[in-house]
Image (cartoon, rainbow, N blue to C red):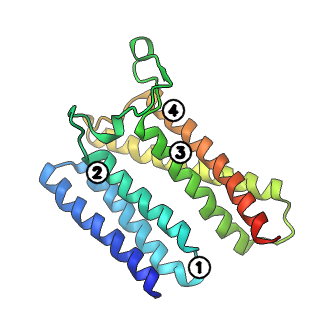
Amino acid sequence: MKKSEWLLLIFNLAYITGFTVYYLLQRNYEFMAYIGVIVVLVALVAGFQHRIHFPHFILWMFSVWGLLHMLGGGLRLSSGMVLYRWIPIELYNAHDILGEFVILKFDQILHFYIYFAMSFVLAHVLARITNKEVKPLYFYFFVVIGSMGLSVVNELIEFTAVIISPNTGVGGYYNTLLDLLFNTLGAITGAFVDYAYRKTLHR
């Protein structure tokens, strides 16, 4: 393993260990489950990195996501709300009518970010296993669809958390659909940016 990859591994182990202790003390079992998911993802990437060779900027994007995800559920603002519920920019608020229909929350920004990064991941993997002659339109269609599919898995994990512990505060119908909307926007944006990035590499 390269020195830069060791740095990434140490970074991930540091925040995972810290938040594991924190959430155990808080008895926050929902986020303990999420820590388990992150541990599995880190182990998979570390185990297959010698074959897949993710660029370091992709590995850092995922590492930062993991940290932000943990902060989102654990960090409380001065108002007492968790970071996930913070509304840095209020673009639309129908709280009085539709309850959870509020844009733009920190949670939605993070959903956009993770599936933006996921498009880079899937594009990298697909580029290694597909014919180089695949047209960009078809290639990025599967990148976006794949990223959106994985976002559904994330929502199913949240649904499981609600079943196990109804007081998780994950949210209801509007929250789920807004999550899926920002997941999709992130996936599409990531595909466009990845395409532009690859074009610059082949000039």
Q: Which of labels 3 and 2 is toward the front?
A: 3
Left or right of 152: which side holds 35? left
Q: Distance between the residues labelled 3 and 2?
A: 20 Å
Q: Whole-percent x and y of residue 66?
A: 39, 59
Q: Distance between the residues labelled 4 and 2?
A: 21 Å
Within-10-Å neighbours for mark 2: few <14, some 14–19, many 20+: many
Q: Secondary structure beneath disc 1?
A: loop
Mark closer to the chain start, 3 or 1: 1
Q: How far apart are marks 2 and 1 (CA)?
A: 29 Å
Q: Which amino acid does label 2 sit on?
A: Phe
Q: Mark 2 points at which residue?
A: 31
Q: Do the residues labelled 4 and 2 touch (CB within 8 Å)?
A: no
Q: Distance between the residues labelled 4 and 3?
A: 10 Å
Q: Mark 1 points at which residue?
A: 53
Left or right of 197: which side holds 150? left
Q: Whole-percent x and y of residue 60?
A: 48, 67
Q: Name the residue under label 3.
A: 112
**Residue at the spot x=22%, y=31% of the render?**
79
